Image (tube, helix red, strand yellow):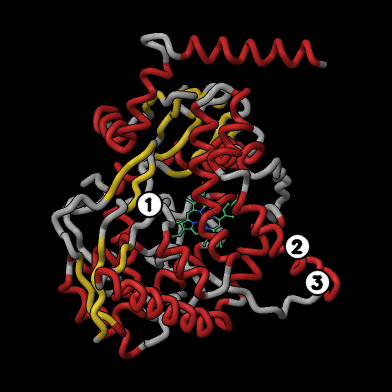
C-alpha cells in the first residue's frame, strides 16, 4: 500500500543519511572505492595469513587466504554463501536491466545457461576455432586500418565507445554489436551509481545512465526474432557473430617485454592454430600476464545470506561478503619466486612434469591454463568455477596468435600509467595507445 511504500522509502533515506556521518562504515569504506587493491594488499600484509576484514561503503568483506578457508568458502552451500547474490548486488539488474532478474535455480548440474556454456560451447570449440580465427583476423585488420588514418595506433583501452568504435560498428552494419559492446559498460556504471544513491532515486539514475536502456532495447529487438525463429526450428545451426573478450593486458605485456616475440612465434610456426596444450609457451605467457596484472584484487566473492562461520571462528555477517585476496596472493613470495618480476615462462612444465592437455591417464595437467585449483583462482573455484574459461582462453590464444603472426607492436608512450582502479577492479587506462606495424 502507499503509506507502507512511503514509510519504507523514508526509513531507507534516513538510513542513507546516517551512513554519511563521520566514522560510519560508509565514510571508512570510501577508501576502498578509490584505492581498493591497496586496501586489500595492506590488510593481507598485516594479517599474516589469517582472515581479515575490510570496510566498503555498503558492507564489510572478510578476506580469507588459507587453503582450508578457501575450501570452506567455495564448498559452502549457496543458501549461506551465494555468488548469485553478489552478482545481483554488483549489477543491480532490477534497475539496470529493465527489471530482468534471473533466479538462482541451481540444481546439481548448475543453472541452464551455465550448463550450455560449459558443455555445448566447450564441446563445439574445435568447429568454432577456425571461424573465430577468421573473425579475429578480420576484426584486427579493420581496426588497425581504421586507426591508421588517425594516429597509426590502436587505442586498446577505449572505455567511452566514442565515435571511432561507433563508426566501426556502423561500417559493419551491426547495431547489435554496438549495443552488445555498450551494454556491459552501461550496466556497470548504472549499477555503481545505484549502489551509492538512496533507493528511491535508483530507477531514475539507472534510466539516465543507460540512456533509457538504449543498448538493452536494441539487443532485445535484434534477439527476439532470432529466438522466435530458433524456437520454431528447434535447431541450432544458425551462425553467430562473436566478439572476443579483451586480451588487453597480455598484448601490453608483449609490447613491454619484446624478448618474448621470437620464442612465441617459433612455437606458433609448429602450431598456427593454438589449442589447449599445443602451445605451452603461449599458455605460460598468458597465465603469467594474468598473475602479473591481475584484473581484480579479489575473487570467489560470496554474499552471506545467512551468518557463516569459518573454522577458527571467523564469521561473515548476513549481507557481508567473503572473498579471496587473489592479487595479494599472486604477489606473495610464499607462492611465487620473485613475484614482482614478469617471467613469461614461469608456468612452463619443468623437466619431468607433464605437458599437454591431458596426461596418459587422462588426468588434467595441473599447470594448464584453464585448470582451476586452490593455487590458481583466476577462474574461481568449486561449483561456480567459470564455465566460459575454455572459450575465454581459446579467444585469448587466438588474439595473441594473430598479433604475433601478423604484426609487430609497441606502446606509443611506455612511461604512461597503464591501469586505473575502482573498488577492487584494475582496468586498462584509457589513452594507452598500442602501435601495430604489419610484418
Ligand atoms: C579471461 C576471461 C574470464 C575470466 C578471468 C573469468 C573469470 C570468472 C570468475 C572468477 C568467475 C567466478 C567464479 C567463482 O566465484 O567461483 C566466473 C564465473 C562465470 N563466468 Fe567467467 N571468466 C572469463 C570468461 C568468461 C566467458 C568468456 C564466459 C562466457 C562465455 C564466462 C561465463 C561465466 C559465468 C556464466 C559464470 C558464473 C558461473 C556460475 O554462476 O556457476 N566467463 N568467471
- Residue receiving disc 1: 375
Label located before the other in sequence (2 or 1): 2
Residue 77 visible, this orientation: no
- Single out the residue that lies furthest toward the right: 232
Q: Is residue 86 left or right of residue 65?
A: right
| Label 1 – label 3 distance at C-alpha | 45 Å
Residue 193 position, x and y percent, is 50, 33
Secondary-structure class at tag 1? loop
Q: CA distance from mark 2 to mark 1?
A: 42 Å
Q: Mark 1 or mark 3: name the one nearer the start of the chain.
A: 3
In the rendered image, which quarter is residue 256 located in?
A: bottom left
Q: Using residue 287 as the reference point, say whether residue 360 is left or right of it.
A: right
Badge nearest the viewer, 1 or 3: 3
Residue occupying the point 34% across, 78% down: 145
The residue drawn where x is 63% and y is 38% is: 78
Q: Note whether 370 is above or below 1 in the view shown.
A: below
Residue picked out by circle 2: 224
- In the rendered structure, find residue 229 and report the number of the disc placed on it: 3
Q: Where's the C terminus, which quadrant?
A: bottom left
Residue 354 in picture, x, y percent from top left: 36, 73
Can residue 388 be spotted in the picture? yes
Distance of label 3 from label 2 (alpha carbons): 8 Å
Q: Quadrant of residue 153?
A: bottom left
| Residue pictured at 50% horizontal, 12% vertical | 17
User: Helix, strand, or loop for circle 3?
Assistant: helix
Amino acid at each position: 500500500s502507499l503509506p507502507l511504500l512511503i514509510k519504507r522509502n523514508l526509513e531507507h533515506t534516513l538510513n542513507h543519511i546516517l551512513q554519511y556521518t563521520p566514522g560510519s562504515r560508509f565514510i571508512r569504506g570510501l577508501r576502498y572505492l578509490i584505492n581498493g587493491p591497496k586496501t586489500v594488499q595492506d590488510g593481507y600484509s598485516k594479517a599474516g595469513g589469517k582472515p581479515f576484514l575490510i570496510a566498503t561503503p555498503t558492507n564489510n568483506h572478510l578476506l580469507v587466504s588459507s587453503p582450508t578457508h578457501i575450501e570452506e568458502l567455495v564448498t559452502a552451500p549457496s543458501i549461506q554463501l551465494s555468488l548469485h547474490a553478489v552478482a545481483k548486488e554488483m549489477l543491480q539488474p532490477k534497475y539496470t536491466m529493465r527489471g530482468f532478474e534471473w533466479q538462482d535455480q541451481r540444481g546439481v548440474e548448475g543453472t541452464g545457461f551455465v550448463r550450455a556454456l560449459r558443455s555445448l560451447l566447450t564441446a563445439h570449440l574445435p568447429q568454432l576455432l577456425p571461424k573465430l580465427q577468421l573473425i579475429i583476423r578480420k576484426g584486427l585488420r579493420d581496426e588497425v586500418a581504421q586507426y591508421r588514418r588517425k594516429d597509426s595506433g590502436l587505442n586498446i583501452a577505449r572505455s567511452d565507445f566514442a565515435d571511432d568504435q561507433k563508426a566501426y560498428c556502423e561500417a559493419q552494419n551491426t547495431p547489435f554489436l554496438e549495443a552488445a559492446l555498450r551494454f556491459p559498460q552501461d550496466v556497470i556504471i548504472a549499477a555503481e551509481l545505484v549502489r551509492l544513491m538512496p533507493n528511491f532515486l535508483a530507477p531514475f539514475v539507472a534510466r539516465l545512465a543507460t540512456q533509457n536502456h538504449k543498448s538493452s532495447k536494441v539487443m532485445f529487438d535484434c534477439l527476439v526474432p532470432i529466438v522466435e525463429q530458433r524456437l520454431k526450428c528447434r535447431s541450432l545451426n544458425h551462425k553467430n557473430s562473436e566478439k572476443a573478450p579483451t586480451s588487453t593486458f597480455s598484448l601490453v605485456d608483449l609490447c613491454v617485454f619484446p624478448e618474448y616475440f621470437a620464442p612465441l612465434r617459433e612455437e606458433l610456426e609448429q602450431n598456427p592454430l593454438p589449442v589447449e596444450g599445443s602451445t605451452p609457451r603461449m599458455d605460460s605467457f598468458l597465465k603469467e600476464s594474468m598473475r602479473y596484472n591481475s584484473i581484480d584484487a579479489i575473487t570467489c566473492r560470496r554474499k552471506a545470506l545467512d551468518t557463516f562461520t569459518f573454522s577458527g571462528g571467523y564469521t561473515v555477517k548476513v549481507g557481508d561478503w567473503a572473498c579471496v585476496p587473489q592479487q595479494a596472493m599472486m604477489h606473495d613470495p610464499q607462492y611465487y619466486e620473485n613475484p614482482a618480476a614478469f617471467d613469461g615462462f614461469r608456468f612452463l612444465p619443468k623437466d619431468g612434469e607433464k605437458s599437454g592437455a591431458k596426461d596418459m591417464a587422462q588426468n588434467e595437467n595441473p599447470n594448464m591454463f584453464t585448470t582451476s585449483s586452490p593455487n590458481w583462482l583466476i577462474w574461481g573455484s568449486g561449483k561456480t568455477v567459470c564455465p566460459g574459461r575454455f572459450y575465454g582462453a581459446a579467444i585469448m590464444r587466438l588474439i595473441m596468435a594473430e598479433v604475433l603472426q601478423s604484426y609487430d607492436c609497441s606502446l606509443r608512450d611506455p612511461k604512461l600509467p597503464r591501469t586505473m582502479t575502482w573498488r577492487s577492479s584494475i582496468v586498462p587506462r584509457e589513452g594507452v595507445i598500442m602501435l601495430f606495424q604489419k610484418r
